[in-house]
Image: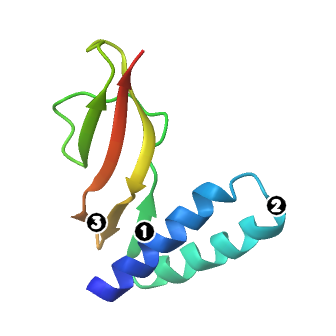
């Protein structure tokens, strides 16, 4: 599975760089459907609220504020296989 997760990590990085490009979005959708048929899904928690009680991500916190923290960058997505988190996301969090 390690190699498959590496492919997902690379695909997620491409998807974030090519975001909002309809020409490529259909390819990402097809890939996600194929992973879904294998019981695997992934998601990028960008712009989601962050709290220290979150268990699906490992965070590096920047800035000085500790209230209203938001995930501003995703290094690795959260990967779920058969309903269980198999890779915690690696994210950058900033206080707003």
Disc 1 + disc 2, Cβ < 8 Å? no
Direction from residue 86 to residue 16 in the image, left or right: right
Give the secondary structure at mark 2: helix
In the image, 32 versus 63, the foreground residue is 63
Q: Position of residue 56 (x, y in %)?
A: 25, 49
In the image, 30 versus 76, the foreground residue is 76
Give the secondary structure at mark 1: strand
Mark 3 vs mark 1, CA separation in Å: 9 Å
Question: Which part of the image, by quadrant, shows the C terminus?
Answer: top left
Quadrant position of residue 8: bottom left
Q: Residues within 10 Å of mark 1 (few under 14, many from 20)?
A: many
Residue matched to label 1: 41
Residue placed at 49% from the left, 34% from the top?
47
Q: Residues within 10 Å of mark 3 (few under 14, many from 20)?
A: few
Residue placed at 21% from the left, 37% from the top?
54
Q: Which mark is residue 83?
A: 3
Q: Residues within 10 Å of mark 2 (few under 14, many from 20)?
A: few
Residue matched to label 2: 22
Q: Position of residue 15 (x, y in %)?
A: 61, 62
21 relative to 73, above or below: below
Residue placed at 68% from the left, 54% from the top?
19
Q: Residue furthest right?
A: 23
Query: How many labels sit on residues?
Result: 3
First of labels 3, 1 by sequence position? 1
Q: Position of residue 61 (x, y in %)?
A: 27, 31
Give the secondary structure at mark 3: loop
Residue placed at 64% from the left, 71% from the top?
28
Direction from residue 82 to residue 45 in the image, left or right: right
Q: Does any portion of residue 45 appear in the rendered image?
A: no
Mark 1 vs mark 2, CA separation in Å: 21 Å
């Amino acid at each position: 599975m390690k190699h498959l997760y590496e492919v997902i990590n690379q695909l997620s990085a491409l998807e974030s760089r090519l975001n909002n490009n309809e020409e490529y979005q259909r390819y990402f959708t097809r890939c996600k459907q194929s992973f879904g048929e294998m019981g695997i899904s992934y998601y990028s928690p960008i712009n989601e609220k962050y709290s220290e009680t979150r268990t699906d991500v490992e965070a590096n916190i920047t800035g000085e504020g500790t209230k209203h923290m938001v995930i501003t960058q995703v290094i690795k997505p959260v990967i779920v296989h058969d309903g269980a988190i198999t890779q915690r996301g690696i994210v950058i969090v900033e206080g707003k």
